[in-house]
Amino acid sequence: MALYEHVFLARQDLSQQQVDTLVEQYKGVIEAAGGSVGRVENWGLKSLTYRVKKNRKAYYTLMDLDTPPAGLNEMERQMGLSEDILRFITIKVDQHEEGPSAMMQKREERSDRGGFGDRDRGPRSFGDRDRGPREDRGPREDRGPRRPRDGAEGGAE
């Protein structure tokens, strides 16, 4: 059997109990095929980046699966037919991660990896770096005349 991480998005107008019922239904499909479901994380109702089937939000759920490919194919087939499931993705992994997923960790724990959440890291490498004092670059006269920009004073008319 192979190990998978499976995330699916359920419609925003479902209740959390209905989402839990969907999880139990798909657990049954996996177990009927001889597999097992490990960790199940409900990430809650989150905003989507763009509308998916006229929904602006969706319930996100992660499932760790240990199943033969036939069980996974049957679960994905049923999800594709269900009107309650907006999207899903399955990724084959070598081993399941221990502890909570990155989505469930506290923001402070995730921010030590870097990214836009850290505002006290100092200068970044993509444009807002400090180029040093102007004295190091020399006075303007030493660098030659300035070229006029298009549409600026002194430019072609």
Image: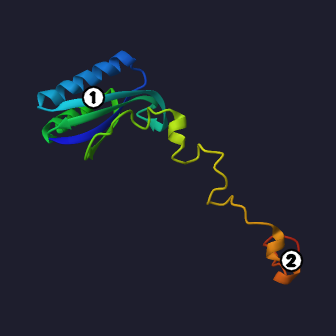
Residue 95's tag is none
Seen in the picture, residue 100 relative to 124 is either above or below; the reply is above
- Does the image show residue 144? no
Q: Which residue appears at 88% of the width and 72% of the height?
A: 153
* Secondary structure under the numbered disc 1 in the rendered image: loop
Q: Which residue is mark 2?
A: 140
Across and down, in percent, residue 33 comes to: 12, 32
Task: Name the colour scheme.
Answer: rainbow
Across and down, in percent, residue 30 comes to: 18, 30
Q: Which residue appears at 80% of the width and 67% of the height?
A: 133
Across and down, in percent, residue 131 comes to: 73, 66
* Secondary structure under the numbered disc 2 in the rendered image: helix
Name the quadrant of the C terminus.
Answer: bottom right
Q: Which residue appears at 78% of the width and 72% of the height?
A: 150
Seen in the picture, residue 151 relative to 92 is either above or below; the reply is below
Label 1 vs label 2, nearer the camera: 2
Per the model, the C-alpha gap separating discs 1 and 2 is: 68 Å
Name the quadrant of the N terminus.
Answer: top left
Q: Which residue appears at 26% of the width and 43% of the height?
A: 95
| Of 94 and 45, the residue lying toward us | 94
Q: Amino acid at mark 1?
A: Ser
Occupied quadrant, residue 42: top left
| Of 96 and 28, the residue lying toward us | 96
Q: Amino acid at mark 2?
A: Arg
| Of 12 and 155, the residue lying toward us | 12
Q: Earlier in the sequence, mark 1 or mark 2?
A: 1
Across and down, in percent, residue 98 comes to: 33, 36
Residue 82's tag is 1
Seen in the picture, residue 92 relative to 39 is either above or below; the reply is below
Residue 3 relative to residue 103: left or right: left
